[in-house]
Amino acid sequence: MRFSRLNSEAGNAILETIGFVTVAFGLILTFGLQLFQLQSEAMQLELLARNSLRDYLTHQSETLLETARRHIAESRDFQGLDVAIDVVCRPDCLNRPFDIQLSLYAGTLRASAFGVVGE
């Protein structure tokens, strides 16, 4: 039996290429899944901001800050996470009509919703 074939380098290029492509595909797949998850969280935060503002504009039984906190507490995606809330009224929140902007911040994500409170 001859063992000289085991020492030759012939055929190793194909195996190295397959190994490299497998590792590269795994890294690309992992990176793509992380981007998909981040995009999904950003869309959920945007939906939370819009629904909070819509709920406030239609009912106005509580302040926008309370409405946003309630929606965050009811959300299964952001429950228990630290979500910062920013409310800006132009010219001010006391005299109608005014423009209102709700911004939510969760980690590196930011979402805003804009509305108008009429007379």
Image (cartoon, helix red, strand yellow):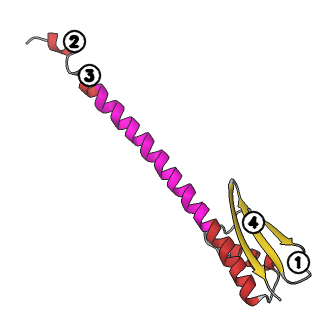
Counting residues from the start of the chain, the first of labels 3 and 2 encountered is 2
Counting residues from the start of the chain, the first of labels 3 and 1 encountered is 3
Labelled pair 3, 1 in contact (Cβ < 8 Å) = no
Q: Which residue is mark 2?
A: 7
Task: Report whether 5 appears left or right of 102.
Answer: left
Q: Nearer the viewer, mark 2 or mark 1?
A: 1
Task: Please report the residue visible at 19 percent of the width from the left and 15 percent of the height from the top.
Answer: 6
Query: Which kind of residue does numbered mark 4 sit on?
Result: Ser
Q: Which residue is mark 4?
A: 103
Mark 4–mark 2 distance (CA, rounded to whole Å): 65 Å
Counting residues from the start of the chain, the first of labels 4 and 1 encountered is 1
Q: Nearer the viewer, mark 4 or mark 1?
A: 1
Q: Secondary structure at mark 4?
A: strand
Q: Considering the whole magenta stretch, tell me its main secondary structure.
A: helix
- Which contiguous range is marked in magenta? 16-44
Residue 112 versus residue 67 in the image, above or below: above
Task: Report whether 53 appears left or right of 63.
Answer: left
